[in-house]
Amino acid sequence: MKRSFCILAILLFLLGGAYKSPSQVTFTGGKGLGRVLSADPVKPTDIFLSGNVSTYQVQTGPATLSKYYLSNLNTTVGLASYLETYFNIIPFQDNQKNLWGQFGDIHLGVKYLTPLATNFFKFGLSGYYKFPTAAIGNVAYETFSTDHPAWAARALLTLDFFDMMPTFPIKFNFNLGYIDHNIFDTYFTSNIDQMFVGAGVQFAIRSFQFFTEYSGEIFFNNSHNVPYNQNSHRLTQGIRFMGPWNNTIDLSFDFGLTQYDSLKNQDIFHKEYYSWKARVGITHRFSVYKYFDKSAKLQRMKEEEERRKLEEIRKKREKVKQELEQMKKRIEKKDDKKK
């Protein structure tokens, strides 16, 4: 009985301390979970700088261990209450061919929150353009890509239960989109075109934010050769919490769901994706609101004027002090001459 009471007290303490945690960004930028974006953007004038490193290792022979490392570095900027932009680079990516790996592709994206939005229901649109800066495209273990310029678009739906359940803030995000891996081929009919599907849930307990999501890239024009379970898709479990110096630390783990009967005959539609991936990241948020808000500008001007006046007073005091020192020296010299 006593044990049950203690457990209940702990749960009430945790849930009672729940709050709506600050916005966070995905692995490649843009407000959201891991890969799944939320419909609403980050706050206007907020800037998120984020980086993460992920790894996967697999035994490829009796004495051979294949290692895969990937890093992301991105910036997310809130432009308005309905608009954000994000930029992601891959500073390092293993390609399983060169000893030191390579610089990966660059993505530039934008998100728009449509007028179809309430505190509970939000509908948005997002898209990105890929610059093929990687020396080698479609690297081993990673999701499908090409060495061509590409673009993608998504419809975003968010259901936010914070106002309904403020003591247990929970949010659901759903994404459905199209990925055109080559802007020079036909739209929507190419065999390499993919559909992005994603769904995730996040909730906060005190300063911890937990999220679980499913995401996948599906060859929808080639389903007869690539059954659904042979596409790249995974389940991601993650946690975020506040670290030192107002940084957010995130830890996540991917569970690969791709299934093959055999991989003896590999082609561009069938390759070995990672079966798991561990990831650690850090995000720092800062705001430039004070540089745009009118009242904040006036306050800043007032503070600068006060600092200027204080500086003038300090200089006058220094000048008076120097004059007194000089006067003292002159008096001392006169006294010495009289002696």
Image (spheres, grey):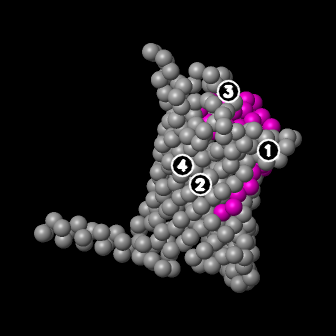
Q: Is residue 284 above or below residue 56?
A: below
Query: Would you name the residue on which mark 3 appears?
Result: 267
Tell me the chief SS of the magenta region: loop
Considering the numbered disc 4 on the image, is that residue within a helix, a strand or a loop? strand
Q: Is residue 154 above or below residue 293?
A: above
**Residue at the spot 82% in from the left edge and 47% down from the top edge:** 187
Q: Residues within 10 Å of mark 1 (few under 14, many from 20)?
A: few
The quarter of the displayed image where residue 270 is located = top right
* Mark closest to the chain's N terminus, 4 or 2: 2
Query: Would you name the residue on which mark 2 appears?
Result: 198
| Residue interval drawn in magenta | 129-156
Q: Position of residue 224 (x, y in %)?
A: 66, 37
Q: Which amino acid type is marked by label 3?
A: Asp
Could you tell me how far apart the alpha carbons at marks 4 and 1 are, in whole angstroms?
37 Å
In this rendering, which labeled residue sits more in front, label 3 or label 4?
A: 3
Q: Position of residue 291 (x, y in %)?
A: 73, 73
* Mark closest to the chain's N terminus, 1 or 2: 1
In this rendering, which labeled residue sits more in front, label 1 or label 3?
A: 1
Whether residue 15 sits left or right of residue 222 in the image: it is left
In this rendering, which labeled residue sits more in front, label 2 or label 3?
A: 3
Question: Is-magenta flag for residue 75?
Answer: no
In this rendering, which labeled residue sits more in front, label 4 or label 2?
A: 2
Query: Would you name the residue on which mark 1 appears?
Result: 189
Whether residue 232 sits left or right of residue 19 in the image: it is right
Considering the numbered disc 3 on the image, is that residue within a helix, a strand or a loop? loop
Could you tell me how far apart the alpha carbons at marks 1 and 3 are, in whole angstroms?
19 Å
Q: Which mark is residue 281?
A: 4
* Mark closest to the chain's N terminus, 4 or 1: 1
